[in-house]
């Protein structure tokens, strides 16, 4: 099986601080990491390879040159090959333009690595939270898709995917080639080994540009090809205050709550 995992390098949102005066994000000094949901997608591919050793895992990212650090991390964990797609003409792309560029890049990478049986993505990136790029890639390629995947296994010319639903877990089969987006499963991704980490550090990761994608239409890329326009960004106001009701028993607590709501003319 030949699997492509699409990953994104994102700022570690747990390290981002808010400027108390300007109410803006402080990005200086914030480390960049592999998007966690993409890490789950990579681990899902790795688990397929554990059972099917002839499986090849290729990782692809769109971004600046520094995104190669994230790709090398993926090589250290489980990937066999990595590619970066980067070009000034792609700057400012929204999710629709990004998914289009990636779909065009997939065709180029397939010419080098062979046809992909499955394309794995994280359900969303933690810096944008749109959950749009994976499904849009499927639409551009006209592939069937499964979202909210937890794990997957090869089943002949199909994948058997466990996916998260409101009622619990659902098992679906999807014919390959297909796109699967992954959410957080019950297990954590594996850590890289020292041997793989040393090999990844030496790896030469090719950079593909617009010139390498002969079928790409640049009117669908970058700012000009992005129908989404950001009108305003702001930091939500933090809610403060609150009252904790903890009387001697539940009846007394309920009575106290009623009194407070009545006094505030809420009920």
Image (spheres, helix red, strand yellow):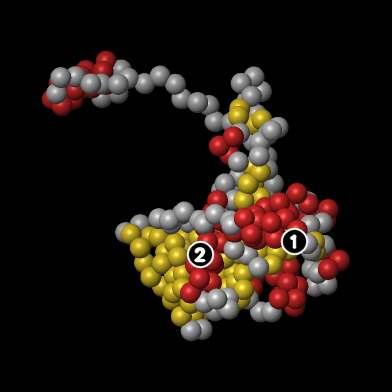
Identify the disc placed on residue 140.
Answer: none
Q: Earlier in the sequence, mark 2 or mark 1?
A: 2
* Residue drawn at x 45%, y 65% as measured from the top left: 151
Please give the residue where the numbered disc 1 appears in the rendered image. 203
Q: Mark 2–mark 1 contact, CB under 8 Å?
A: no
Residue 247 visible in image: yes
Outermost residue toward the front in this view:
195
Q: Position of residue 38 (x, y in %)?
A: 57, 56
Q: Position of residue 109 (x, y in %)?
A: 73, 72
Say above or below: 68 vs 147. Answer: above
Q: Is residue 117 left or right of residue 257?
A: right
* Residue drawn at x 62%, y 73% as measured from the top left: 56
CA neighbours of label 2 inside 10 A, class few (<14), some (14 to 19), many (20+): many
Q: Is residue 112 left or right of residue 132?
A: right
Say above or below: 215 vs 34. Answer: below
Q: Assign a secondary structure to mark 2.
A: helix
Q: Position of residue 181 (x, y in %)?
A: 53, 62
Say above or below: 6 vs 24. Answer: below
* Residue drawn at x 69%, y 67% as measured from the top left: 81
Q: Toward which corner of the image does residue 115 lie, by quadrant?
A: bottom right
- How many angstroms separate mark 2 from mark 1 (CA)? 23 Å
């Amino acid at each position: 099986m030949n699997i492509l995992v699409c990953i994104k390098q994102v700022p570690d949102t747990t390290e981002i601080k808010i400027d108390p005066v300007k109410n803006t994000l402080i990005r200086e000094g914030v480390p960049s990491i592999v998007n966690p949901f993409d890490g789950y997608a990579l681990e899902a591919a790795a688990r397929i390879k554990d059972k099917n050793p002839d499986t090849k895992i290729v990782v692809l990212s769109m971004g600046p040159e520094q995104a190669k650090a994230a790709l090398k991390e993926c090589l250290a964990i489980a990937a066999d090959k990595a590619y970066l797609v980067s070009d000034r003409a792609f700057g400012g792309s929204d999710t629709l333009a990004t998914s289009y560029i990636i779909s065009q890049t997939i065709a180029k990478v397939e010419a080098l690595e062979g046809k992909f049986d499955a394309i794995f993505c994280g359900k969303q990136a933690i810096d944008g939270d749109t959950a749009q790029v994976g499904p849009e890639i499927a639409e551009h390629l006209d592939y069937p898709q499964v979202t909210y995947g937890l794990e997957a296994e090869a089943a002949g010319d199909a994948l058997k995917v466990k996916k998260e639903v409101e009622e619990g877990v659902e098992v679906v089969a999807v014919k390959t080639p297909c796109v699967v987006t992954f959410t957080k499963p019950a297990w954590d991704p594996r850590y890289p080994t020292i041997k793989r980490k040393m090999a990844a550090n030496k790896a030469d990761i090719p950079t593909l540009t617009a010139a390498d994608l002969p079928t790409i239409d640049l009117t669908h890329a970058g700012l000009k090809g992005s129908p989404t326009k950001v009108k305003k960004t702001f930091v939500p106001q933090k809610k403060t205050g609150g009252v904790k009701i903890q009387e001697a028993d539940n009846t007394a607590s309920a009575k106290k709550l009623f009194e407070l709501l009545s006094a505030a003319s809420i009920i």
